[in-house]
Image (cartoon, grey):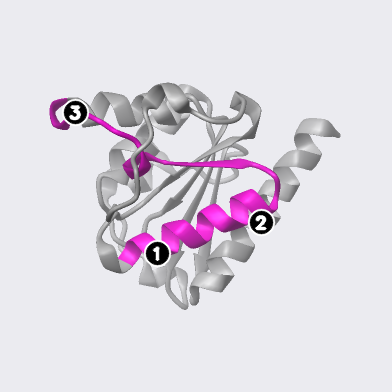
Amino acid sequence: MGDRRRKRLSELRGVYDKRVFIGGSYHQTRRSLLDELAGAVRKERFVPIIADEYRMAEELIHDQTLSLLHSCRYAVFEASDLSGALMEIERTRDYGTRTLILFRGSSSADWRVSRMLSSFLMPGDPMVKVGRYVKPATAAKHVGRWLAAMRRKLYG
């Protein structure tokens, strides 16, 4: 996370209905995309929650990350590189989290999905949407459109 000050888990901003958990690879080369997705979340007047911005004890990362996810009504995952986010994606169904899963590629064949994630994604599931993008700006647009649709569903 660089030299930015990490927040305490008790400093979780926003309310449940406005929080969006953002997951994906935290490697330096991919982290900037998570920041771009967070910007799209803020633009739609939601509150982005990215786990690596919070202080966590190394031995509790699994539990504390899932706690952050459970504190959010929505989740966006960048799943081009299947990272630790796979565990979090699996839990979204248990938590009733409305989820957008994005992957980089020019066709659906570009996404090499694990057997577990393939079984998780059910056709026509209203809780999970999968989107493909080529450029980071396109991924951010997906997030904006999806959150606008979620707001319309929530507030009619």
* Amino acid type for the residue under numbered disc 2: Gly
Crowding at dot 2, Cα within 10 Å, few <14 / some 14-19 / many 20+, comes out as: many
* Label of residue 144 in the image: 2
Which of the two labelled residues, at mark 2 and mark 1, occupies the earlier sequence position?
Answer: 1
Per the image, the residue denoted by label 3 is 57
Q: Where is 127 relative to 105, above or below?
A: above
Apparent side of residue 82 relative to residue 20 in the rendered image (left or right):
left
Few, some or many C-alpha atoms within 10 Å of disc 1 (few <14, some 14-19, many ≥20)? some
Residue 31 on the magenta segment: yes
Q: CA distance from mark 3 to mark 1?
A: 24 Å
Vertical arrangement, residue 57 with respect to residue 40, above or below: above
Question: What span is in magenta?
Answer: 30-59
Q: Position of residue 62 (x, y in %)?
A: 24, 30
Mark 3 touches mark 2? (CB < 8 Å): no
Name the residue that disc number 1 marks. 32
Magenta segment includes 127? no
The location of residue 97, given as percent across then percent down, is 53, 31
Q: Left or right of 38: which side holds 155?
A: right
Closer to the N terminus: mark 3 or mark 2? 3
Front-most of residues 6 and 100: 6
Few, some or many residues within 10 Å of mark 3 (<14, 14–19, 20+): few
**Residue at 13%, 27% in the rendered image:** 59
Residue located 51% across and 66% down the image: 132
What residue do we see at 43% from left, 74% from top?
A: 105
Identify the element where label 1 is drawn: helix
Q: Tell me the CA gap for discs 3 and 2.
A: 32 Å
